[in-house]
């Protein structure tokens, strides 16, 4: 049997003389690896008699432990030296700004919803909400559109197969006007609300999507007339587009739930190939753009909402939130609002820290 003391002396000397971690690893494999010399000595113990094993095993175990400890100590020394070298060569300037982190943004529709709520809160309007899955009665019949009414054909409606509680069918609401009826039935009059929310119609192109957003306004009180409606719309549009140079034109129209009904046009001019709101549409280089529909609430709608039309009158208006966002922020394709393209959202999105704070005048009606 080889002299373990001689092997130990030689191994420890070579370990102390190793120059780097790679050389140390080679020595570990040479002595303690599966085919190493010390591992070979350990394997001879199995063939020995108990007496021989009792005599020789302690020396072999001592050899193995001593070499393993020496290798571990030398490796720790190499690791410590490498760390010291790295600390000496690397520096960190704590005065530098932290790296930018990915941050979400507020969608233009949410931004405009907040802007509109803030503007109408200042005018004394509360926010009313209602279900997006509506029944035929609230969506059409209570708004003076019975089953045979031709105006129903103007709404490309998503119907459900389930029957509605008041007859007809369940559907995805085609406008937020049912909220007006529900609020009148629940709260009576006087009333001053806006009803923003998602609506659904089976239509899709650059200016139409199957789901879009509307905001409708309703005022019910005594002695309300078209002058109140025009002043409200002018005030709202001037505040939203942040300009006093807003000129409106009211054209006679037809909506089954208002009588008389008016389409509201706003004057614009072409600047650098784009429409810019402002000025009279009759001026040279200007034109009129249809923006929203409105009118005095039809007597039948007031009646079906549980109020006396001889005592209470009112006006209503509705406009697409997405369209307002397109006009104010220079977007040209409505479909991009719902594509979820991160590049589009980064370009048109708003910082959450720059959002308007809704005033205390905004209420919530469920």
Image (cartoon, rainbow, N blue to C red):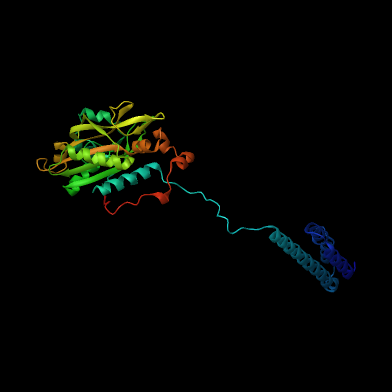
Task: Pick whichever, 338 or 149, lies toward us.
Answer: 338
Residue 236: which quarter of the image?
Answer: top left
Q: Where is residue 136 drawn, in percent x and y?
A: 24, 37
| Quarter of the N terminus within the rendering | bottom right
Q: Is residue 279 visible?
A: yes
Relative to 281, residue 95 above or below? below
Total numbered labels = 0
Q: Say left or right for 162 vs 5.
A: left
Q: Where is residue 86 drawn, in percent x and y?
A: 70, 59
Residue at the (24%, 41%) spot, across then down: 217
Relative to 88, residue 253 above or below? above
Q: Where is residue 335 drawn, in percent x and y?
A: 41, 34
Task: Pick whichever, 290 or 235, lies toward us.
Answer: 235
Residue furthest to the top in view is: 284
Q: Say left or right for 338 vs 158.
A: right
Q: Is residue 172 visible?
A: no
Q: Where is residue 12 drawn, in percent x and y?
A: 84, 67
Residue 45: which quarter of the image?
Answer: bottom right
Residue furthest to the left in view is: 310
Residue furthest to the front in view is: 284
Residue 202: which quarter of the image?
Answer: top left
Q: Say left or right for 179 vs 37.
A: left
């Amino acid at each position: 049997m080889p002299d373990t003391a001689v092997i130990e002396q030689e191994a420890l000397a070579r370990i102390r003389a190793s120059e780097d971690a790679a050389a140390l690893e080679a020595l570990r494999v040479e002595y303690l690896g599966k085919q190493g010399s010390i591992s070979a000595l350990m394997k001879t113990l199995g063939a020995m008699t108990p007496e021989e094993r009792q005599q020789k095993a302690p020396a072999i175990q001592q050899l193995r432990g001593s070499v393993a400890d020496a290798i571990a100590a030398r490796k720790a020394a190499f690791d410590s030296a490498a760390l010291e070298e790295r600390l000496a060569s690397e520096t960190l300037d704590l005065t530098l700004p932290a790296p930018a982190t990915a941050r979400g943004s507020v969608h233009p529709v949410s931004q405009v919803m907040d802007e509109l709520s803030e503007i109408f809160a200042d005018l004394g309007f509360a926010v009313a909400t209602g279900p997006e899955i509506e029944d035929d009665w609230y969506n059409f019949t209570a708004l003076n559109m019975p089953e045979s009414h031709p105006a129903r054909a103007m709404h490309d409606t998503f119907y459900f197969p389930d029957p509605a509680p008041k007859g007809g069918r369940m559907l995805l609401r085609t406008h937020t006007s049912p909220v007006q009826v529900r609020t009148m039935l629940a709260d009576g009059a006087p009333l001053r609300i806006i009803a923003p929310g998602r609506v659904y119609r089976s239509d899709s192109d650059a200016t139409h999507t199957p789901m879009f957003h509307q905001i409708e306004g309703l005022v019910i009180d005594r002695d309300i007339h078209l002058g109140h409606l025009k002043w409200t719309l002018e005030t709202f549009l001037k505040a939203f587009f942040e300009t006093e140079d807003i000129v409106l034109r009211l054209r006679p129209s037809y909506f089954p739930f208002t009588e008389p009904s008016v389409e509201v046009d706003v004057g614009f001019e072409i600047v650098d190939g784009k429409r810019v709101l402002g000025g009279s549409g009759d001026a040279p280089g200007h034109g009129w753009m249809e923006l929203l529909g409105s009118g005095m609430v039809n007597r039948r709608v007031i009646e079906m909402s549980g109020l006396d039309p001889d005592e209470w009158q009112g006006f209503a208006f509705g406009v697409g939130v997405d369209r307002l966002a397109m006009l104010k922020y220079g977007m040209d394709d409505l479909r991009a609002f719902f594509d979820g393209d991160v590049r589009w959202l980064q370009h048109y999105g708003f910082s959450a820290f720059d959002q308007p704070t809704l005033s205390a005048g905004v209420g919530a009606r469920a």
